[in-house]
Structures are given as structure tokens and as C-alpha cells.
Image: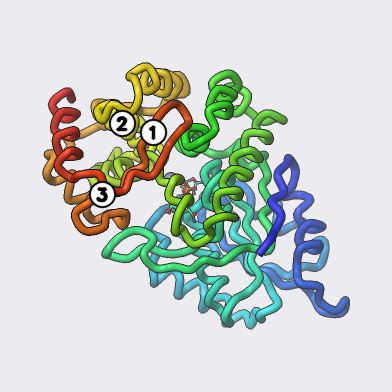
Amino acid sequence: HCYDIVIGSGLIAQAVSKIKHYLYQKSSHQKIRLAIVTDKNVAAFHLNTLQTKLAENEIYTLPIIVEAGEQSKSFPILQNVIDKILSARLERGDSIIALGGGVIGDLAGFAASIIRRGMHFIQMPTTLLAQIDSSVGGKTGINSPYGKNLIGTFYQPQCVITDIDVLGTLPSREFRAGYAEMVKYGLINQPHFFEWLEKNWQKVFSKGPIQIEAIARSCQFKADIITHDEYETGQRTLLNLGHTFGHMLETATIYDSNRLIHGEAVAIGIILAHQFSEQLNLISPTVTQRIKAHFKTVGLPTQLQDIPGKLPNAETLMTFIAQDKKVSQNNLTFILTRALGQSFIAKNVSPNAVLTFLKQKLMKS
Ligand code: NAD
Ligand code: ZN
């Protein structure tokens, strides 16, 4: 399934023509009807602009506004979204727009994939993370008490409309967290992209052509990987660089009031994956130091000491890793690296080696 990702400035305002272009062509006397799923924060800044433009073009919209945050990826909220769409009698040929970050994209995409066995779906991602990561690749879903993202589908949108203007209202902490995932793309297998980011990061952080280029290159990179491995049986696993340690830290800090957000946990996770690679004599410490220096420059955390609050002991941290879905039997799968931007999938990592490594890291903190 092939679809366009349109990236630029002023797109929310121009969304009408894009939406008309990408949607199912209805006969001219029928009105286009759209449900816009969004969260309270995004609605406050951007819903009105979008709705007004659509209304001017006689496009009927049904706004569905949920609470901001991960807790909206749940069955009760999903049911609420579905009920609102069904009670407004939106049909299969009508569409759902996800206007928001990854939470909204995952929730609305999942709803779109199961209502009437699949409604048209358009992504309008509003966080950097959603623009470069979650809106590309077609993973949708909600969380379960047994873990994050355990219930969901693979469902591709009709198109993705990425407006960089909306990043202007995104809290800078959220922007930096998304940036960690952008750096990750360079570190997976594009050292030149990492070097380009080292030079251009300030322009990536402000609105303009370099920011658009960085987003486009990231989407292209993710799209390339996914085209070859849509259902994550091989190379797509590389996208998990920094995520095994990252998820471990997210789980460990989940109840802290000042908990890590995903991209911050991934930044520390990336450094830990490199330090672990050092310990296995795969890379020299200079590689890790260089990445660490870049993360520090942009204001991302890089080490366990940067985490506010006390972490559990190494044994407990290991149980969080074992809950992760990348574990099979007694061996752990990790993304490790052979050089800057040369990551690979290591399938037989011994849990004991990881435990020892974590003990050392905790001792230093
Ligand atoms: P998010 O959707 O919770 O957004 C972060 C915060 O920013 C929220 O408070 C939101 O209200 C606010 N916000 C969003 N856009 C804004 C804007 N333009 N201006 C002001 N505030 C704005 O979080 P996220 O980091 O975008 O996404 C995280 C989610 O994405 C997780 O649930 C994760 O599992 C999922 N994810 C999915 C995929 C995938 O492939 N489907 C990939 C990565 C992550
Ligand atoms: Zn991630």
C-alpha cells in the first residue's frame, strides 16, 4: 500500500485541497464527512484553524477530543471514539483524521482500522516524534494492563499531512524527545545523516527548509526499512536501537511525578546500547562519547545519573527487560553497533552479561 507524506508549512490551512485530493472520490452531490480525533492540548491550538477551513469548503466535521496523554490509548477511550463515529452515522467512505501526536495517531488509526472493517484514515501528526516516526509505518493500537501497544493492527493511512507550523506550539521538551529518534536513524545505518545533524541541529530545531529536510529524510529512512519489512520480521527490528534499555527506564520511572518521556528514555537507551557494545569490544569509547556530546548539546539526558529519583536495583531492571517483547527464551535480542552508524541485530545476548553491565552502571550513579 503506497501513500504520500506531504511535508511543509501552512498545510493545515491548505488541508482542504489535500484532503479532497486524497479522499475517496464521492459523487459531487455527496458531502465529504470527516471525524477529527485530537487531544485537548492540540485542540486548543490547532483544531479551530482546521475546522474553519474545512467548513468553508462545506466539509462536515465531527471533532472528537480526548484527554492528552498515554492513558487515552485504552479500551474505554477507544469505545468512546467508535461510538461517536457510529452515532454520527459516518460511513465506510467517510474518513477519520488523526490530528495530534503518537497517542492520537495510534488510537485513531486503530479505530479507523476496525470501524466498518476499515474507514479512510488521514494522519496529521503534530509532534516531532509523530512526524518522523509514529505516522509512518502503519502500526496502530492501544495499551493493555499487560503492556504497551499490545492490542492493535497494521493499517496504512490514505496520506500523511505534516505541517511544521504546528511544532511552534510543541513544548521544547517534547521536541527534543522526538529529536532523539531522529538521531537514532543516523545511528542505525546512516552515519552521514548523524554528522549532518551534528552540524545542522540548530536549524533542525527552528522552522525552515532544514527542518523540513530533516523530517523528510527521517520519514524516507523509516519508509525504506518498512517497505522491506512491513510486519517486523527482520530489518524493522533495527528501529528498536536504544529501545530495550529505553523501555526498561520508562517502566522504572512510570510512577515518578517527574518521569522520563519516551524520547528521553531512548536517548539514555542509545548511550547504554553503545556502552554495552563497548564492553563487548565492538566499538571504541570515542564513538559513544561523540553521541553523548551531541545529546548533551541539544539538552537530552545521556546517563542514569540524569534521571530524577531513585532507580530500582539491577535485578528488578532486568525483570522489566524480560517483560519486553524482544525476549525469546533465555536469550535477549539487542540492537548493538560495530561503529558509528553501523547497528546490527544481536540475537543471542546473555541476560547475565546485561545484568552485570547494569550493576556497573548503577554503581557509578
Ligand atoms: P503524545 O501524543 O502524547 O504528545 C505529547 C504531548 O504533546 C501531549 O501532551 C500532546 O497533547 C502534546 N502536543 C502534541 N502536539 C502538540 C502541539 N503541536 N502543540 C502543543 N502540544 C502538543 O506523544 P508522542 O510523543 O507524540 O507519541 C507517543 C506515542 O506514540 C506513544 O504512545 C507511543 O507508543 C506511540 N508510538 C507509536 C509508533 C508507531 O509506529 N505507531 C512509533 C513510536 C511511538
Ligand atoms: Zn521510540
Judged from the image, the secondary structure of the residue bearing numbered disc 2 is: helix
Residue 337 is marked as 1
Please tell me which residue is depicted at 48% across the width and 30% down the height of the picture: 341
At label 1, counting other C-alpha atoms closer than 10 Å, the crowd grade (few under 14, some 14-19, many 20 or more) is many
Of callouts 2 and 3, the N-terminal one:
2
**Which residue appears at 68% of the width and 69% of the height?**
34
User: Which residue occupies 18% across, 25% down?
Assistant: 365
Left or right of 357 on screen, residue 11: right
From the top left corner, tell me how far across and down residue 46 is, in percent. Answer: 63, 49
Residue 108, by quadrant, is: bottom right
Whether residue 158 is situated above or below residue 314 in the rendered picture: below
- Please tell me which residue is depicted at 70% across the width and 30% down the height of the picture: 208
322 horizontally vs 21: left or right: left
Q: Is residue 295 left or right of residue 314?
A: right
Identify the residue under disc 3.
332
User: Can the viewer see residue 173 in this picture?
Assistant: no
Quadrant in the rendering for residue 328:
bottom left
Q: Nearer the viewer, residue 299 or 215?
A: 215
Give the residue type that dot 3 points to: Leu
Q: Which numbered tag is attached to residue 277?
A: 2
Q: Are marks 2 and 3 in contact (CB under 8 Å)?
A: no
Give the Cα separation between the discs numbered 1 and 3: 15 Å
The residue carrying pointer 3 sits among few (fewer than 14), some (14 to 19) or many (20 or more) residues within 10 Å by Cα, namely: many
**Pick the front one: 217 or 264:** 217
Type of amino acid under label 1: Thr
